[in-house]
Amino acid sequence: MVVEINGKSEEIPGSVVLDALNAKHIDPQMVAVELNDTLIEREHLGSTPLQPGDRLEFLFYMGGGR
């Protein structure tokens, strides 16, 4: 299925948000996920379905600052 991930069209296997994270080798504990501009709770990543053309944003936590 083709979805948009962080602004780039990508072919991913599977049918739920967690499948997209696994395909990209991303630990679900290290990222916040938006699906079509809606934040998805971690406990729902494995049950939230994806449709062709959906827009995913993976928001990574970064440390640092002064």
Image: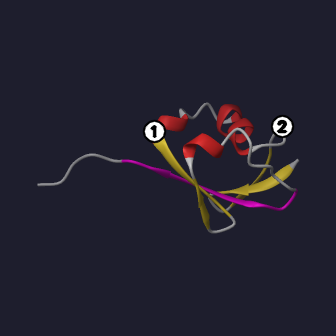
| 11 or 45: nearer the viewer | 45
Seen at 69% across and 66% down, the residue is: 36
Query: Where is 44 relative to 13, above or below?
Result: below
Q: Are marks 2 and 1 in contact (CB under 8 Å)?
A: no
Q: Secondary structure at mark 2?
A: loop
Label 1, on which residue?
30
Seen at 48% across and 36% down, the residue is: 29
The picture quadrant where one finds residue 3 is bottom right
Seen at 78% across and 61% down, the residue is: 54
Query: Where is 54 relative to 50, above or below?
Result: below
Q: Where in the figure is residue 46, as x and y percent of width and height?
A: 70, 38
Residue furthest left in the image: 66
The picture quadrant where one finds residue 21 is top right
Q: Amino acid type of disc 2?
A: Gly
Q: Which mark is residue 14?
A: 2
Q: Where in the figure is residue 23, as x and y percent of width and height?
A: 71, 33
Seen at 80% across and 49% down, the residue is: 49
Q: Residues within 10 Å of mark 1 (few under 14, many from 20)?
A: few
Q: Residues within 10 Å of mark 2 (few under 14, many from 20)?
A: some
Q: Where in the figure is residue 39, as x and y percent of width and height?
A: 57, 60
Q: Amino acid type of disc 1?
A: Met
Q: Where in the figure is residue 50, as x and y percent of width and height?
A: 81, 51
